[in-house]
Image (cartoon, rainbow, N blue to C red):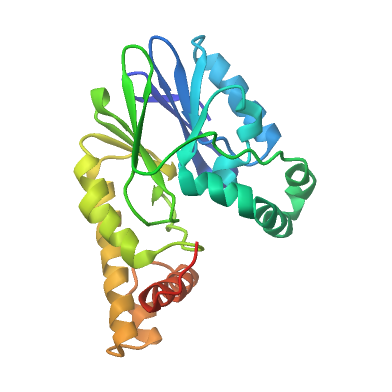
Amino acid sequence: MTWQEVADRIFVRRYAFFDQSIAAVIGREGAIIVDTRTTDAQAAELEADLRSLTEVPLAAVVNTHHHYDHSFGNARFAAAPIWGHVRCAEVLRTRGETMRADVMRSLPALADEIARVVITPPDRTFDETASIDLGDRRIELRYLGRGHTDNDIVVVVPDSGTLLAGDLLENDAPPSFGDAYPIAWAVTLRDRLLPLVTEVVVPGHGRPAGRAFAERQAAELAELARLIREMASGAIGPDEVRAASPYPAETTRVALERGLDEVRGSAGG
């Protein structure tokens, strides 16, 4: 748990909780952090870690999507602009309390801390693209399409060839499909994310990597999407999907459920 400089003034710190990779991008006039962790205590730890890294002011915070482990620490940083997709802010406003209750049930050891979270949606939102000026470098925010959720965004740092992918990519563990769109996700990676990967890619969880990792995960998701489409057509059954899936049985089960809903047009966020 130390900062790793993966490219010029782009630092990543892996936190043991959920093996989450938090990125900081530093410019002449300010820094951004990407995602804010799960509780105020975790966000306070991140804030202290950022102060140990740089003296430049915090120019902005970015939420890569609405999930609690990426946004429930927002209140700690509310003095800075918080950027996210328009649907990220909407979900936190309209379903934040439902998400809080679900997390308290699933993580009872953190229930008291989660109960005290002040859910704070992004106050700077966009549909397709936005940018943040750090003086000597410009950060690009892009929505690429449905994937891990319906509001995932990526952070592009053009002057360094670095892509901060959020949970559109996860390393060292299978992707999470709880409210994903597996078939669209495969297209999003193949057609929109991979063209942005030139050097370093930082996943939302696990180790930073390179293009080969991104290509491998895109290929795995493409195979999963193919299997789901074949099952939806009646060409194969669930046992064949499980046997051929690149992911463990429980991950495949959730992906299959979400994917079949997607084919039928009933997959919600």
Q: Tell me: 174 left or right of 100.
A: left
Residue 155 horizontal/vertical position (percent) = 36, 35
Q: Quadrant of residue 127?
A: top left
Residue lying at 38% horizontally and 15% vertically, measured from the top left: 27
Q: Position of residue 201 (x, y in %)?
A: 31, 38
Q: Name the quadrant containing residue 95.
A: bottom right
Q: Residue 11 location, x and y as percent?
A: 41, 25
Q: In terms of depth relative to the viewer, which is nearer, 230 or 144?
A: 144
Residue 56 visible in the snapshot? yes
Percent x, y for residue 260?
Answer: 40, 77
Residue shown at 65% from the left, 28% from the top: 76
Residue at 29% across / 61% down in the picture? 186
Seen as rendered, the residue at the extreme right is 112
The residue sitting at 58% across, 45% down in the picture is 69
> Residue 197, relative to residue 12: is it above or below?
below
Identify which residue, 56 or 248, lies in the foreground: 56
